[in-house]
Amino acid sequence: MSTQHGGMMGNPYEGMSIKNKVIIVNHFGGSRQKWHYSHKYRFQNNNWYLIGASVNVGAPCDYYQSLDYNLSTGDAVFDYSSEDCNKKIR
């Protein structure tokens, strides 16, 4: 991602890590609505391949959603939840 794609958060690049021979690249950004991406790459068959990703998006007092997919297994998990901060507590 470009250094301009982080919104008010600035440069979206959060860092890189290696776990179980997989390179994980993280990005984060947004304004009121925040987002976080993790892309996972593995070196196999003499080349680099995207093998999966996690995408999280949401805003406080509104909603949160996440998508995690694995291109090696074909599995995908989507989750959605909402939050209403205007409810009165009795």
Image (spheres, grey):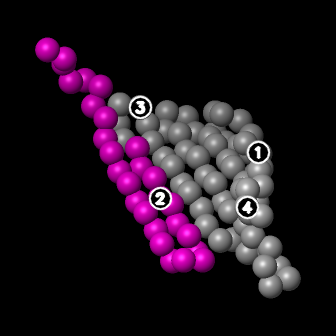
For label 3, the residue is 60
63 relative position to 43: left or right: left
Tell me which label, 2 or 1, sits earlier in the chain. 1
Amino acid marked by disc 4: Asn
Looking at the rendering, the stretch of residues picked out in magenta corresponds to 64-90
Tell me which label, 1 or 4, sits earlier in the chain. 1
Tell me which label, 3 or 4, sits earlier in the chain. 4
Q: Secondary structure at mark 2?
A: strand
Tell me which label, 2 or 4, sits earlier in the chain. 4
Q: Secondary structure at mark 4?
A: loop
Judge the density around disc 4: few (<14), some (14-19), many (≥20) Cα neighbours within 10 Å: few
Identified at 77% across, 50% down, the residue is 16
33 relative position to 89: left or right: right
Q: Which percent across, then down, holds residue 86?
A: 25, 23
Q: Are marks 2 and 4 in contact (CB under 8 Å)?
A: no
Distance between mark 2 and mark 4 Cα atoms: 21 Å
Q: Is residue 70 magenta?
A: yes
Q: Is residue 5 magenta?
A: no
For label 2, the residue is 67
State which quarter of the image contains the N terminus. Answer: bottom right
Tell me which label, 3 or 1, sits earlier in the chain. 1
State which quarter of the image contains the C terminus. Answer: top left
Amino acid marked by disc 1: Gly
Residue at the bottom extreme of this rendering: 45
Distance between mark 2 and mark 3 Cα atoms: 18 Å
Q: Which percent across, then down, holds residue 37?
A: 61, 52
Identified at 33% across, 45% down, the residue is 81
Judge the density around disc 1: few (<14), some (14-19), many (≥20) Cα neighbours within 10 Å: few
Q: Secondary structure at mark 3?
A: loop
Establish if 54 lies above or below 8: below
For label 1, the residue is 15
For label 4, the residue is 20
